Each structure stands twice: as structure tokens, then as C-alpha cells.
């Protein structure tokens, strides 16, 4: 290793490695997706084969999202939210709805948008868009149902004394891990890896929301968490329009 390369901070080496790994995984995933899409789009293919291919697509896309999330978190470590381009949460939800169906072609997904303002502008640029999409994906992944209705609301509020927009996503069948019954995503850090792996999407949402000066939490819809249902709340600082 040269003296020049030794002078590069370890975190830069880590960023480079993640970019390298991400590029390799993304290319492989894209190749697999192409083959799967050819299978379930081909005429005459058995319906059961198509269904299995559709389910495989969800797993491949989930792997891609995981790599994207890690790269996003690395990039977001030292950002200043106020310097990011303002983003409209309402438009981000609309875009995420389209992407959501691509991630889960075997599921029937509907978004019920309740109490939505004309626009809800926050600090966040593409980070905020990724955050909203990730929360919706997480809600779907935690539901055992193939027929899913996500109830989405966006209302004004505040965080640490500053104006904010609060986005809530409810899924009546979503199953939160028992240790999250208290509504604190940070409880994941006290769990073993085999248990914590179920919360990767929520951990990403928590860390990214905090980097943007906001917050994220998840809680059961009912007092008895075993009955199912979960609410996911994203709070992002309000900004002036773009």
C-alpha cells in the first residue's frame, strides 16, 4: 500500500468498498431481475411458475434496496438538512406508490390517502423520497397478506419546536417484532442479529430521518401487539416551497 493510499481516512476506504460492492451486487441483481421478468411475462408459462417468479422479484428488489440504504446512510452522515433541496412529501408518496407495485408484483397493493394536503414541503431532496419509499416497503414486508391496503395521512406538526410534516402509514395486518411493542425502534440495538434482521427497514428509516433533522417510529395499532397491525410515523422538518 502506498503512502498516499495510507493517508486516506478509513471511512473513505469504507465508502469506496461499499460503492464497489454495491455496483457488483446491483449488476447481479439486475441480471436476475431481467431473467425473472422474462419468465413471468412469457406467454404460455404455467401460472404457478409465474407466481414463484413474482415472489422472487420481491426478494431481489429487497436486496437491492438494502444496498441502496447503506449507501444512503453513508452519504447522509454529515449532511446539513437546510442545505438540501426541498422535497414535496405528497409527490414523494405518489411516486413511491408506483415503485411499490414493482417491488411486490405478486401482491395487490392499494394506498388510501386520507387528510392529505395539497403539498407538504420538507428538507430532504432525494433522501426524503427514499425514506418515504422505504417506509412503505417496510409496511408491506411486515404484512403476511397478499391483499394490502396502506392508509396514509400527512398532517402538520412540529419536532423539537420547529414546524414539521408528519406522515403516518397504517397497515392492519403488519406484524412488528415483539420487542418493538413499546414503539421505540432503537430497542433493536439490544437484540441479537437473527432477531434484529426483521427491522432493517425501520432502522434505516430511523437513522435517515434523524440525519434530516426529523424522526421515525413504529408502534402496534392495538394494545395487544399479537393481534397485528402497525403504524409507521415519519416526521420531517418543514421547508419553504422549491
Image (tube, rainbow, N blue to C red):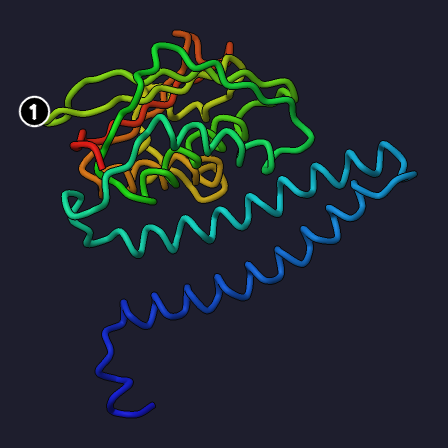
Task: Tell me the quadrant of the picture where the C terminus can be found.
Answer: top left
- Read off the residue under disc 1: 161
Q: Position of residue 185 (x, y in %)?
A: 33, 31
- Judge whether 184 appears above or below 42 on screen: above
Q: Position of residue 126 (x, y in %)?
A: 34, 44
Judging depth in this view, the residue of 97 and 12 nearest the camera is: 97
Is residue 190 visible from the viewing direction of this image?
Answer: no
Residue at 73 percent of width and 46 percent of height? 37
Task: Tell me the quadrant of the picture where the N terminus can be found.
Answer: bottom left
Residue at 51 percent of width and 9 percent of height? 227
Residue at the extreme bottom: 2
Judging depth in this view, the residue of 94 and 214 nearest the camera is: 94
Asked if residue 232 lies left or right of residue 26, the reply is left
Is residue 7 visible from the viewing direction of this image?
Answer: yes
Asked if residue 147 lies left or right of residue 133, the reply is right
> Dot 1 lies on which element?
loop
Asked if residue 188 lies left or right of residue 226, the reply is left
Residue at the extreme top: 223
What is the quadrant of residue 113 in the picture? top left
Asked if residue 119 lies left or right of residue 17, the reply is left
Crowd around label 1: few <14 · some 14–19 · many ≥20 (10 Å): few
What is the quadrant of residue 7 in the picture? bottom left
- Judge whether 73 appears above or below 184 on screen: below
Residue at the extreme right: 44
Q: Position of residue 197 (x, y in %)?
A: 47, 41
Residue at 28 percent of width and 70 percent of height? 12
- Judge whether 87 appears above or below 120 on screen: below
Amino acid at each position: 500500500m502506498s503512502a498516499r493510499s495510507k493517508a486516506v481516512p478509513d471511512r473513505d476506504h469504507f465508502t469506496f468498498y461499499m460503492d464497489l460492492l454495491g455496483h457488483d451486487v446491483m449488476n447481479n441483481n439486475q441480471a436476475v431481475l431481467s431473467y425473472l421478468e422474462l419468465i413471468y411475462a412469457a406467454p404460455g408459462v404455467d401460472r404457478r411458475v409465474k407466481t414463484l417468479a413474482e415472489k422472487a422479484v420481491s426478494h431481489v428488489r429487497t436486496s437491492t434496496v438494502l444496498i441502496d440504504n447503506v449507501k444512503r446512510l453513508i452519504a447522509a452522515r454529515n449532511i446539513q438538512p437546510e442545505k438540501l433541496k426541498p422535497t414535496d412529501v405528497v409527490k414523494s408518496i405518489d411516486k413511491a406508490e408506483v415503485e411499490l407495485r414493482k417491488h411486490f408484483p405478486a401482491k395487490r397493493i392499494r394506498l388510501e390517502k386520507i387528510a392529505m394536503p395539497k403539498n407538504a414541503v420538507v428538507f430532504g431532496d432525494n433522501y426524503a423520497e427514499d425514506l418515504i419509499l422505504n417506509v412503505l416497503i417496510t409496511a408491506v414486508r411486515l404484512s403476511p397478506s397478499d391483499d394490502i391496503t396502506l392508509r396514509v395521512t400527512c398532517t402538520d406538526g412540529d419536532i423539537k419546536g420547529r414546524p414539521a410534516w408528519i406522515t403516518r402509514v397504517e397497515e392492519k395486518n403488519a406484524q412488528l417484532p415483539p420487542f418493538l411493542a413499546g414503539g421505540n425502534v432503537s430497542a433493536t440495538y439490544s437484540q441479537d442479529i437473527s432477531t434484529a434482521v426483521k427491522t432493517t427497514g425501520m432502522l434505516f428509516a430511523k437513522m435517515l430521518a434523524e440525519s434530516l433533522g426529523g424522526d421515525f417510529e413504529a408502534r402496534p395499532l392495538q394494545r395487544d401487539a399479537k393481534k397485528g397491525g402497525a403504524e409507521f410515523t415519519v416526521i420531517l422538518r418543514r421547508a419553504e416551497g422549491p
